Image: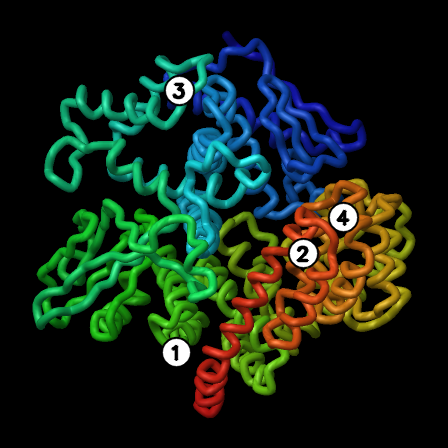
Amino acid sequence: MNPTKEIWTRESLMDQIDFALYAGPKVLNYFAEKFDYPFPLPKQDMLAVPDFGPGAMENWGLVTYRETALLYKSPKLGGVARCFSVIDKLRVARIIAHELAHQWFGNLVTMLWWDSVWLNEGFADFIGFLGTQHILQEWPNVLEQQFIFEQIQMAMAKDQEPQSPPIHRSSTQTDLFTYFDYITYKKGASIIRMLEYVMKNDFWVGLKIYFKTMAEMNAREEDLWAAFDKAVMESESPSVGWDSNKFNVSLFMDSWVNAAGFPVVAVNRVNGSHVQLSQSRFIVNLTEDNATNVPTNVSQQWYIPLWYRTCTNKGITSLLWLQPNSTVILAIEDDCWVMFNSEVRSFARLHYDDATWQRLLSGWSSDILSIERSQLISDAFNLALIGSVNYSRALELVQRLPDEVDAVPWKSAFIGLNYLHDMLFTHPGGHLFFEYVQKILNSAYKTDLWNNIEVDDFKLSVFSGKIVEEACGWNVTSCRDVAVEKFKEFMEDCQLSDDGSSSCSKVPALARRRVYCTGIEQKHTTDFERLWHLCNHESIAIEKENLLYGLSCCDDSDLLLRLLNASLQLDKPCIRRQDVGTLFKFLGNNPVARKIMWQHMKSRWSDYIKKKLKQPLKTMTMEAVRTFNTAAELEELNQFVNEIDGYDNKQLFNNAVKMVEINVHWRNSYAESVIDFVQQALLRP
């Protein structure tokens, strides 16, 4: 069967469907071949919806998308196409691949009940990344880099919390919406990726068995494990487990799927020629107050596959197994570095002792891959978050960033740096931390980076865009001067436009948010009104988001309140129902807006519930109080929550209270040590 494949959208946007028409059939055929199971329907349509909350939905034969998730036009064509970037192309390819992977994982085979929804979403995420790389063959290895940051690190950030649920959920849960989270999608995909590295070809043979056995049926995890086990048993060269016998899939996956959390592997040098490996569960913010509420045992153990390289075998990746409640002793020469978790294949953090860490740093630039450096940076910030290492380890890695030419280590570092900025925002020494980050960015920023933002080389474009974004955002003068000039040119080019800015803006697509934001920060009310007009007349969704980001940078309380009121009235094209949560995330980056949001939320929270905007309300609350970290601020938040009627309503603000409690603990525990470090660093040339 050769299904027909059509794209549906508003007539005015028909010139943006060519990429989807190329990507959809290409990835559909790729999956059919990969799974040895053809797409069974006579047609596969894809529909772009102007206002669509979920982002995309995998209806069998008619997948629906937000316009930003389906429409793209090559910037090389000029005109309105210049508002699209390489990131937009990647996003559209990824979402198409994810949704079409669902035609097998979710539609052809459906989970028996919602507690196993990760069989749909985790696999669609993992397989979707492979499908995206197949679509974007002109950008080799890009998706592997994206996976480390977007999947593994984002999943770990959620899974390390004390209240994190397991991938396989409780079947008694009544609020099924909570299942659709980073644990289901991103951790699920990360564990599947690790499994594929262990099983190799047996993994793909097992999936073929799974689809042939379970097609048009409902499945549980045990059905998938049985298919994988069958593939291993029948293989001429079967994958091998920790006991040197044929790999036991169900035993391996049991702890990864049915228990919350993930391990940190401690690497300690026991003598001049050996290191010892041990494991424990990695948990942040575990205090006496919340320890009794942790849903699973904090002493959980896993079967951990650990790939590693050493300085004597740089090009060879070896595998060892760390089993539950055991240690491993590995022979390593005294002056030799060892890199565990090669290519970030395992879902685990690594904690090296000081001696082993210093040896590893000797190969940092020459022998450690950029995705590995990214993960080591993420590990360092998070190990500091629980006091296992001093923040100096993470901040010393930050000082190496000016030599980085890949965006992924920068992205990982700024997750940590932005958190520290939030925590030190009201601290008397917070300005020293700001100056420290500025100093790093001053070393990395070059004016010619602006010229590289629009190139078709994905890595160069994204790297250049990231440095420009951060340098301007952290007030590097030379960057902001360029941004202000580009905003002035933009306002001149678009002063007569009555149909939005996509047809007149010449600002590089990846820099538009930062340029529009920098322009609005210059405090000219007429500029705000002009952007507001353009946003309400813009037809291309991604450019509308760029304009909304710029508007969110305003520091005029009346204008900010206008944006917040528009999020309730929903009577302006600039802010539709699907955009409300996005607006709050944008406003969360603005210190003035956070104060306005806090007051607005306290007086209007019930109106958002009446408008069926509970999820955006949660987002607004988290953004409004994200820098709260004093006892007085915690008391103010608790007083507000205590005055709310009804248990369900109070629960909407539960995560915000937990976050602020953690923030208070962080400030009391770590703020002074961070300030001391940056103060000393600023004294050095």
- Residue found at x 68% / y 66%: 637
Select label 3 or label 2 by which is in front. Answer: 2
Q: What percent of the width, then of the height, locates residue 654?
A: 61, 56
Task: Identify the mark nearer the N-term, 3 or 2.
Answer: 3
Determine the image quadrant of residue 242: top left
Residue 585's disc is 2
Q: Viewed as shown, does residue 583 lie left or right of 189? A: right
Nearest to the observer: residue 221 or residue 103: 221
* Towards the viewer: 309 or 292: 292
Residue 486 in view, yes or no:
no
Q: Nearer the viewer, residue 347 or 203?
A: 347
Q: Residue 417 has which mark?
A: none
Query: What number is the disc on residue 33?
Result: 3
Amino acid found under the numbered disc labelled 3: Glu
- Asked if labels 2 and 4 touch by Cβ distance under 8 angstroms, the answer is no
Label 2 sits on what residue type? Lys
Q: CA distance from mark 1 to mark 3?
A: 50 Å
- Residue type at the position of mark 1: Ser
Q: Give the SS element for disc 3.
A: helix
Foreground label between 1 and 3: 1
> Which residue carries the number 1 mark?
392
